[in-house]
Image (tube, rainbow, N blue to C red):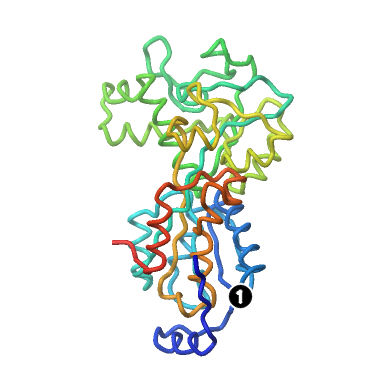
Amino acid sequence: MSFAKLTASTLAIAAMTTGVAVARDQVQVAGSSTVLPYASIVAEAFGENFDFPTPVVESGGSSAGLKRFCEGVGENTIDIANASRAIREKEIAACAEAGVTDIIEVRIGYDGIVFASQLNGPEFTAFTENDIFNALAPKVMVDGELVDNPHTKWSDFNADLPDAEILAFIPGTKHGTREVFEEKVIAAGCEATGAMEAMIAGGMSEDDAEDACLMVRTDGMSVDIDGDYTETLARIDANTNAIGVFGLAFYENNTDKLKVATMSGVEPTTETIAAGDYPVSRPLYFYIKKAHIGVIPGLKEYAEFFVADEIAGPDGPLSNYGLVADPELAATQAMIANEETMN
């Protein structure tokens, strides 16, 4: 793959034609803490192999990154937003209101959401979606009735789980990981245990029941973490009985501190995610502000470099950190080359 470099004169012309002044020469990226390690690896390699400055990559969560991305067009706004979920319609509308009308969506691959705990802690090695729902939902089914969650220990509802106090550190609501956790774990458990059906039978509309199925208890047993995974890891280090929700890549970089649980009998690995066997996986993205291409030096080159076979392919360095290569990577490469925006 060829990565052609823009000359200074070309950039100057592009700046005049797009109406965006060149006041910085570094690509600026913010967003998902899940995508952060991948973007950081790529940024460092990009700086070492290209005649462009190393891109500045910040975290903050998918929602926070997309909010900054949608603030407008210009050198005072970021060029790329990393996200562990797809951009929402309301975010696209917010972007459009601020003049960000041409957005390129880049799917870089896939990741799994895992449940991990202290190496020397209780044997949290096997969960189902029902277990997580029964531990963390505000209302659960007990003896056929929907009641306020009475469970204080994991063994209260599943004798195969440890006789340990329930304590879970989960991503805060600004993180894309939270949305996937809610939909693929909490909501799945809500439906499977019959809680959703009971809510509707009790007079809730289907929409209200779906919303209620995403809720978590607020009595201290489920704790939102607004920081990145390092904060979750620190909390687990300080709480022997705790479990935490992580991206697969972060867990694989901390196997000296954490042990991971299976979900519905499937171990989270790049192989089980690629095969579609692991139930809690999701695509990862970054979003490019097309108006900044040709204006911010190295922006398109960075994006092309990120999804090159040598980087994001199955034998690339990102796979060593848990990224599952996208089988449609070639189509993504062509989309960036052609600067194709979202419909």
Q: Is residue 185 visible?
A: no
Q: Position of residue 296 (x, y in %)?
A: 51, 77
Q: Is residue 245 above or below residue 67?
A: above
Q: Position of residue 125 (x, y in %)?
A: 60, 22
User: In the picture, residue 215 is in which quadrant?
Assistant: top left
Question: What amino acid does circle 1 point to?
Answer: Phe
Which residue is found at the position 67% from the left and 68% from the top?
48
Q: Position of residue 6 (x, y in %)?
A: 51, 81
Q: Position of residue 193 (x, y in %)?
A: 39, 19
> Which residue is labeled 1 in the image?
52
Q: Is residue 18 above or below residue 324?
A: below
User: In the picture, residue 322 is in which quadrant?
Assistant: top right
Specify the quadrant that holds the C terminus: bottom left
Closer to the camera in the image, 147 or 253: 253
Which residue is found at the position 57% from the left and 31% from the top?
115
Q: Is residue 323 above or below residue 24?
A: above
User: In the picture, residue 200 is in which quadrant?
Assistant: top left
Closer to the camera in the image, 174 or 288: 288
Q: Is residue 329 visible?
A: yes
Secondary structure category for the residue under label 1? loop
Q: Residue furthest front?
A: 1
